[in-house]
Amino acid sequence: MKLYLYDHCPFCVRARMIFGFKKIAVEQIFLMEDDKATPTKMIGRKMLPILQKDDGDYLPESLDIVHYVDQLVEPAIAQHAVSPEIDKWYNTVSTTVYKLVVPRFTQADFPELRTPEARAAYIEREESAFGDLNTLLKETHTLIVELEPHMDAL
C-alpha cells in the first residue's frame, strides 16, 4: 500500500497513525504542495491523504483510511465515535489553533514545501483561507490568550 500525504496535515497524521498502531507497513509518498495533477488523477480533486490499496484502488478521506486499515488486522481499535465533548472542544478551538500554526507551517521545512513554487502555492492557499499570515504572527499573544481557557478545559 502507498499513502500519499503532506507532513504538516493533521488529517494525514491521522491516516499515518493507524499504520503505526496496527504495525502495518505502508510506503509514504509526500506530494509537493503545488502538485494538483497527481491527486486529481487519482480521485478527481486535490486533497490528501489518499491511500492506494494493494488492489490499485484509491481511497481518500482520513477517517475512511483509518477504518479500512483498522479492519485489516485484529483487534479493531478505531471503531468508536469521537466523544461529543472532544468534538465540541475541537470545534471551539480549531480556528484559533489554525491561526497560530498555519503561519509557522509556511516557514517550516516540510517535504511538501521544499521548492519555492510549492511554498508559494501553500502560502497562497493558506492566505486565501486565513488572511495575511504576517498579521496572524503579530497576533500570537492575543490568540494564545484566547486559547488558554480552552486548554484548561481540555
Image: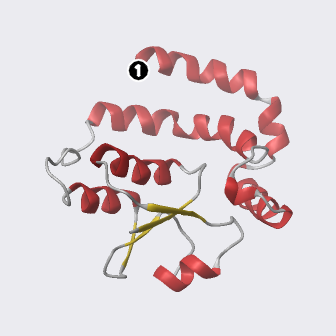
Q: Position of residue 133 (x, y in %)?
A: 79, 44
Q: Position of residue 146 (x, y in %)?
A: 61, 23
Classify residue 12 as left or right of residue 101.
Answer: left
Q: Is residue 147 above or below residue 11?
A: above
Q: Is residue 48 above or below residue 14?
A: below
Quadrant for the N terminus, please. Answer: bottom left
Classify residue 85 as left or right of residue 129.
Answer: left
User: Could you tell me which residue is drawn at 67 percent across and 34 percent down?
Assistant: 100
Q: Position of residue 135 (x, y in %)?
A: 83, 38
User: Could you tell me which residue is drawn at 26 percent across and 63 percent down?
Assistant: 68
* Quarter of the figure with residue 83: top left
Q: Nearer the viewer, residue 99 or 105?
A: 105
Count the numbered circles shown.
Answer: 1
Residue position for label 1? 154
Sort mark 1 into few (<14), some (14-19) or many (20+) by Cα contacts within 10 Å.
few
User: Could you tell me which residue is drawn at 77 percent across and 37 percent down?
Assistant: 136
Q: Nearer the viewer, residue 23 or 83?
A: 23
Quick one: which residue is furthest to the left in this view?
A: 75
Quadrant for the C terminus, please. Answer: top left
Q: Position of residue 137 (x, y in %)?
A: 79, 34
Q: Is residue 140 visible?
A: yes
Q: Is residue 128 visible?
A: no
User: Could you tell me which residue is drawn at 68 percent across and 44 percent down?
Assistant: 102
| Disc 1 residue type (three-letter) | Leu
